[in-house]
Amino acid sequence: MNFIKRITNVFLNKTTFSNAYWQELKSEQGGFSVSMPGTPEYKKHIVNTSSGMLDLHEYSLNRPDIAFSASYCDYPIEVVKRTTKQIMLNNVRDGVIAGMHGRLLSELIIEMKGHSGRQLHAEISSGAGIMEGRIYIVENRLYQISVATGKQNAFSTDIGRYLDSFKL
């Protein structure tokens, strides 16, 4: 995924965005909203997964030292019916970590409006930075939101602000 490649280029500066920069993104098609410190770029990717080719809709905002991403894709209904949401979340988690050549540092089982999710904290590519993210399964739709940054920004309030702004 392009986002995973971009996160290895994140510089190690400390950044906090003022309230003036934060904007709410509402994706009617995606059925979610999230706030980012600027206007994100939208891209549609076709990704090859063990479940077949999927359309991944991604909104990303990249700054020199921090990158924000919100994406969703729809799995075929028959794929969702033949497995559990927990197995799907495990597979997505493993794919995200492997794709960034990272190491999972912690994971929480979470939910939003009764929908299963995970919160991930990972080290990127041999310590190049950190990634904080959340993934949710809603019916057959997978949502992924994440922030990648250098270790100096690991405790930035912007990370929590971004992740907490995600709404279904």
Image: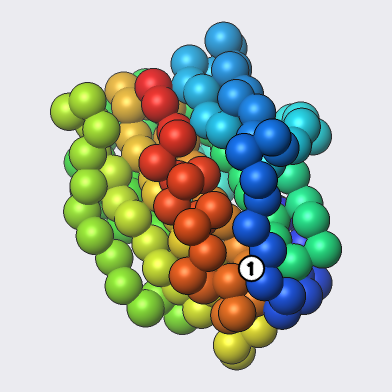
Q: Image check: 106 left or right of 21? A: left
Whether residue 150 sits left or right of residue 89 in the image: it is right
Residue at image position (47%, 70%) is: 155
Q: Residue lying at the far bottom in this picture: please name it.
A: 126
Q: Position of residue 34 (x, y in %)?
A: 53, 30
Q: Position of residue 126 (x, y in %)?
A: 60, 89
Residue 55 in view: no
Label 1, on which residue? Answer: 149
Q: Is residue 55 above or below residue 69?
A: above
User: Residue 53 occupies which quadrant of the picture?
Assistant: top right
Q: Answer whether residue 16 is visible to the viewer in this image.
A: yes
Depth check, front residue: 44 or 144: 144
Q: Is 140 located above or below residue 1 in the figure?
A: above
Query: Residue 124 at x, y = what percent?
Result: 58, 77
Colour basis: rainbow
Near mark 1 (Cα within 10 A), the count class, few <14, some 14-19 or many ≥20, is many
